[in-house]
Image (cartoon, rainbow, N blue to C red):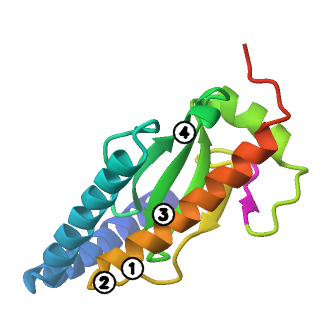
Amino acid sequence: MRPEAAAREWFMSSTKKNMAEFRRQLGSGSIQAAYRALLSYLTSLRGHFKNKYPDWRVSNLYQGRLDISFFTLIPPALDLHHLKIAVIFHYEKFHFEAWLVGRNRAVQRRSWELFKDGRWPAYRVVTPGKGIDSILEWDLTPDIDLDDPDHLTATIEAGIAAFAADIEGFLAGVQPPG
């Protein structure tokens, strides 16, 4: 058997097994219920930021493909630099993160150049590359408890406020792009 044919056969076999497992897991109904609860919480969290920070622009919720779900927050000071904060639910890590992101790839690259040499002990500076969408990342929650949404929201909000303040403080001495 030719290598391409063997790879295709393995992929088809692997996909078939994965789909069978996916179907089995969906059969219990718990995945759908958990997903609905998570998206409901994200919608509520988005509304919380929209109501509490009326001068910030808040995007729609992106549900994702079971990799990440997110919405973005654009405080005015970051908007001047074409930057925004993404509130991410990372499915594999199963927690919330804050990401600093650029409006587009050019902004992303230019902003990374500004941030890469800064002292960010709490944040990860992410090197640009294919499929990389963040400049800085910060884990907001070690775990999630949707049974206590008020505490979870307070934790996320405090983290986002600190993240935004740190970034705004850093950018205070930087001329916004024209």
Amino acid at pointer 1: His
Q: Position of residue 154 (x, y in %)?
A: 44, 71
Q: Residue at x 62, y 29 (%)?
A: 82
- At mark 4, the secondary structure is loop
Q: Which mark is residue 151?
A: 1
Q: Residue at x 9, y 81 (%)?
A: 29
Question: Is 3 positioned to the left or the right of 52 in the image?
Answer: right
Foreground: 27 or 49? 49
Q: Position of residue 13 (x, y in %)?
A: 31, 73
The residues bearing labels 3 and 1 have C-alpha atoms spaced at a distance of: 10 Å
Question: Is 102 positioned to the left or the right of 88 in the image?
Answer: right
Amino acid at pointer 4: Pro
The residues bearing labels 2 and 3 have C-alpha atoms spaced at a distance of: 14 Å
User: Residue at label 2?
Assistant: 148
25 shown above or below 104 = below
Tell me which corner region of the image, top left, top right, bottom left or bottom right, holds residue 123. bottom right
Question: Is 33 positioned to the left or the right of 132 in the image?
Answer: left
User: Residue at label 3?
Assistant: 157
Tell me where the magenta segment starts and ends, as one range.
Answer: 123-127
Q: Residue at x 26, y 56 (%)?
A: 43
- At mark 1, the secondary structure is helix
User: Residue at label 4?
Assistant: 75
